Image: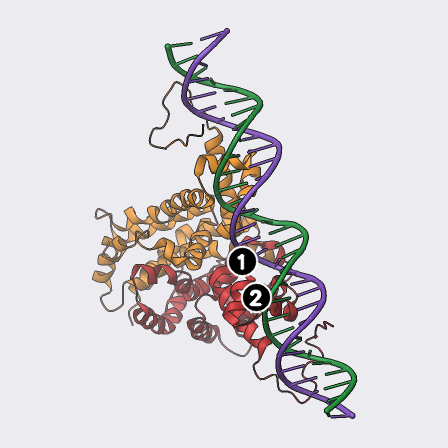
Chain colours: A red, B orange, C green, D purple
Amino acid sequence: MLCFHDTDMAKKKTKVPDLSTEEKIKDAARRVFMKKGYAAARTRDIAEEAGINLALLNYYFRSKEKLFELVMVEKMAAFFGTIHPILNDTGISLEAKIASIAEKYIDLLSQNPDIPLFILSEIRMNPDQFINKLPVAKVLDSHFIKQVQEKRPDLHPSHFLINLLGLTVFPFIMKPVFQMTGMLNEKAFHDRLEERKVLIPKWLNAMLKLKP
Amino acid sequence: MLCFHDTDMAKKKTKVPDLSTEEKIKDAARRVFMKKGYAAARTRDIAEEAGINLALLNYYFRSKEKLFELVMVEKMAAFFGTIHPILNDTGISLEAKIASIAEKYIDLLSQNPDIPLFILSEIRMNPDQFINKLPVAKVLDSHFIKQVQEKRPDLHPSHFLINLLGLTVFPFIMKPVFQMTGMLNEKAFHDRLEERKVLIPKWLNAMLKLKP
DNA sequence: ACATATTTTAATCAAATGATTAAAATATTC
DNA sequence: GAATATTTTAATCATTTGATTAAAATATGT
């Protein structure tokens, strides 16, 4: 008889689930969903990529949507989770926050360059699914915002948040264009990114100083 | 007997094609494709949105893919066509180019806020389809790049192109997040955009001056 | 080794979806 | 107004696709 196992009752018995089927499917799902997006990804693609039968996918994860949510939650945690604690760290200066975000974010996205386009375009195409799932409330009144307001009360603080994220994330948004046109090859791209870890903090601080 | 009309042999006879069926379908296709992306858009959605029969869509445009290409070419022309002539205008200063792009691009994208995410995520999900269709070759050795190189030979000129586009386009990339979280409502968003038309040129020039 | 639980498979279903066909409706020309 | 061309429709196909079922294979506990 069929029996769907819960993630709750995990790993009883002596058997080690040795990066087994469940994780193989999740891995495959990560790759296929990230490459094609939810709509274009077929469960058969994922099954084949994982080297397993199609029924197994539904046995372990009930549905395409459930499996997708797992991947999406993971990616969103990486995307938003990286900046959140830094923005709210009351122990460091504004300059330190900026430098830290630029460096951490570039490192994270270098490993997973299409996280931003993946998340943002899924949100755009299906906004309803993400209501109450975006942890951006804490960003509005973050310590970062307070520090910016103190330094530049004449401008809306969101400008500087957008600028910091834009300068950091936008290269990855444009990466497909760079790659396809040969405008920047892989090595050149990463060289620019390393340069930007140092440059972005300088640029941001210059913007913060620049009085009207 | 069926007879597919070519766009070539357009408008013979006295009949004015008065924004008729063909354009109604194209309009609907623009809306549906832009909202859902290629994979999630169903031809039935488009037909319904256009208020016509499904068969009519295939009668006029042969296939979903052909219809999509039409829309995509249009959007890409808007997205890339706006910057291209400005970047290559040998008659104006670097500062003027920057100001012009910031203003024109913000105006264009204000009208069509999800062009960037639409185009860039379709490219990412299906790069093959866009090979040789990205007119970015002319950007590499544009007049803009030459002007930047002259002013800042110490840094790779692509940095400043990315910065200009990033500061301008990134707010639109993040718009779905802003809207859903109430971080910036529609009015606040547009207020910030108007401010950025003035601010971005100042910021860019500050970056160009900032020596290491 | 036996009984039981878990994992995997092959076969199949039902719905969705892109596309086609043949005929009806409408316009255009002479 | 008949003849011809164009536009539109309803019905239907063939494939794709997410999901299920029942049975086989494998592991696990005693």
Tell me where residue A177 appears, x and y as whole percent. 36, 59
Query: In the rendered view, does B89 fall on the left or right side of A45?
Result: left
Quadrant in which the C terminus of chain A is drawn = bottom left
Query: In the rendered view, does D18 fall on the left or right side of A157?
Result: right
Q: Are marks 2 and 1 in contact (CB under 8 Å)?
A: yes
Q: Chain of mark 1?
A: A
Specify the label residue A155 is tagged with.
none
- Asked whether residue A116 appears in the rendered view, the answer is yes
Q: Residue at x 50, y 52 (%)?
A: B39
SS under mark 1: helix
Quadrant in which the N terminus of chain A is drawn = bottom right
Tell me where residue C17 appears, x and y as whole percent. 55, 48
Q: Is residue B58 above or below residue A157?
A: above
SS under mark 2: helix
Tell me where residue A191 appears, x and y as whole percent. 32, 72
How far apart marks 2 and 1 lie (CA) works out to: 9 Å
Q: Is residue B116 above or below residue C3?
A: above
Residue density around tag 1, few if under 14, some if 14–19, many if 20 or more, within 10 Å: many
Q: Chain of mark 2?
A: A
Give the residue type at disc 2.
Met
Question: Which residue is labeled 1 in the image?
Answer: A122
Q: Residue at x 54, y 63 (%)?
A: A44
Tell which of B18 and B8 is nearer to you.
B8
Question: Which residue is labeled 2 in the image?
Answer: A72
Q: Residue at x 25, y 53 (%)?
A: B138
Give the residue type at disc 1.
Glu
